[in-house]
Image: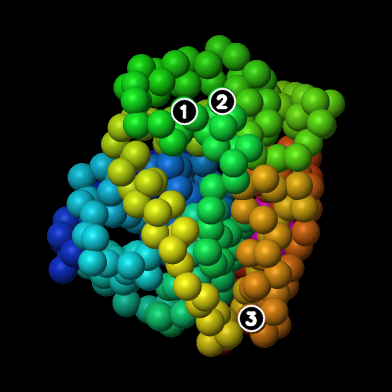
């Protein structure tokens, strides 16, 4: 596990059943519990090996409705945090950890920091309250592919082939669905990604984690349905150092989610960007987001006794 390009795909026995998880990075590194966005599998953590290369041990846990972990209709979204915690205990991690949540995983990360001891919290484009899918994004080509329950196996194959052979066009399709960017801006970001070996690799790993779509669909829709009914949650009890990044051109997660955290979490550090819209880590500005995130985490680690 000292090589960040290697990973462990494991199963942890818990009171919630057998839960899949994946980890990358050195086993003696500071642990980051990674909460992935909706509609992607726990293996998407492989696209964040830039954190493993900085010495962090990333652990990403499967959520209900994804792959073979059944949905319990009685459990609310805050149960994700408890599942995460049980998995960490099961694999021998009993101390507090850093938590990193992206998009829908932002809710899971926030709930974890609210319910369990946490060293630091990072949120990227995170849902922080009631969430309703943007109509324009829902009706986009990418939105229809993700949210439709039909033809998932064939769509999965086509998406992987498109990302492999036509990466620039595929990236622009993602950006058009999720960001208020013009054609020139979308092209510039797509060009930067395909011309950067590491960025292109991360994109391909991200797309791979979206497949097979039929194994992810139930979990995606369960989270969307529950988030649409979410009541106001008080995040003011979160006291760990917190860093949040949001895009001012995000079509998917509106800025009200950012403002909610800014108002509730004392001492939170906010960063507003344009970058790749919802995908705040894409493009040249996205590289600065990564650097700021690493700086935040290393600063927290440096302050620990």
Query: Which residue ends up furthest to the top in the rendered image?
Result: 165
- Give 225 or 285, whichever is nearer the viewer: 225
Q: Which residue is pictured at 67% across the width and 33% down the height?
A: 175
Q: Earlier in the sequence, mark 3 or mark 1?
A: 1
Badge number at residue 145: 1
Whole-angstrom CA distance, mark 2 to mark 1, is 6 Å
Badge number at residue 265: 3
Q: Earlier in the sequence, mark 3 or mark 2?
A: 2
Helix, strand or loop for disc 3: loop
Helix, strand or loop for disc 1: helix
Q: Which residue is pictured at 54% across the width and 21% down the height?
A: 163
> Which-is-in-front pick, marks 3 and 2?
2
Up-down relation of residue 240 to residue 18 (above or below):
below
Residue 155 point in image, percent of width and height? 41, 20
> Which-is-in-front pick, marks 3 and 1?
1
Residue 83 point in image, percent of width and height? 29, 66
Please provide the residue range marked out in magenta: 290-295
Q: Which residue is mark 2?
A: 141
- Give 82 or 183, whichever is nearer the viewer: 183
Q: Is residue 29 left or right of residue 264?
A: left
Whole-angstrom CA distance, mark 3 to mark 2, is 36 Å
**Badge 3: how crowded within 10 Å, few (<14), some, or many (20+)?**
some
Instruction: Let me know if residue 53 is in the magenta part.
Output: no
Q: Is residue 212 left or right of residue 257?
A: left
Quarter of the image for residue 86 reads: bottom left
Q: Which residue is pictured at 80% across the width and 26% down the height?
A: 183
Helix, strand or loop for disc 2: helix
- Give 10 or 16, whichever is nearer the viewer: 16
């Amino acid at each position: 596990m000292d090589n960040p390009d290697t990973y462990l795909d494991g199963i942890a026995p818990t009171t919630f059943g057998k839960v899949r998880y994946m980890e990358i990075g050195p086993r003696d590194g500071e642990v980051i519990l990674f909460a992935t966005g909706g509609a992607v599998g726990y293996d998407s953590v492989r696209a964040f090996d830039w954190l493993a290369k900085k010495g962090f041990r990333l652990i990403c846990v499967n959520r209900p409705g994804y792959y073979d972990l059944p949905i319990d209709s009685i459990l609310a979204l805050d149960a994700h945090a408890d599942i995460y915690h049980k998995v960490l205990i099961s694999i021998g991690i009993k101390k507090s950890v850093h938590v990193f949540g992206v998009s829908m995983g932002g809710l899971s990360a926030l709930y974890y920091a609210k319910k369990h001891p946490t060293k630091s919290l990072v949120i990227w484009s995170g849902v922080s309250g009631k969430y309703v899918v943007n109509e324009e994004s829902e009706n986009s080509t990418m939105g229809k592919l993700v949210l439709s329950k039909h033809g998932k196996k064939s769509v999965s194959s086509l998406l992987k082939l498109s990302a492999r052979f036509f990466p620039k066009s595929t990236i622009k399709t993602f950006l058009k669905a999720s960001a208020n960017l013009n054609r020139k801006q979308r092209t510039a970001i797509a060009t930067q990604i395909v011309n950067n070996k590491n960025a292109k690799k991360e994109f391909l790993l991200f797309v791979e984690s979206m497949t097979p779509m039929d194994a992810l669909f139930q979990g995606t829709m369960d989270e969307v349905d529950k988030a649409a009914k979410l009541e106001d949650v008080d995040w003011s009890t979160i006291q760990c150092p917190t860093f949040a990044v949001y895009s001012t051109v995000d079509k998917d997660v509106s800025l009200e989610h950012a403002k909610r955290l800014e108002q509730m979490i004392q001492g939170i550090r906010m960063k507003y960007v344009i970058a790749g819209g919802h995908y705040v880590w894409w493009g040249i500005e996205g590289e600065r987001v990564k650097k700021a995130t690493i700086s935040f985490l290393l600063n927290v680690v440096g302050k620990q006794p």
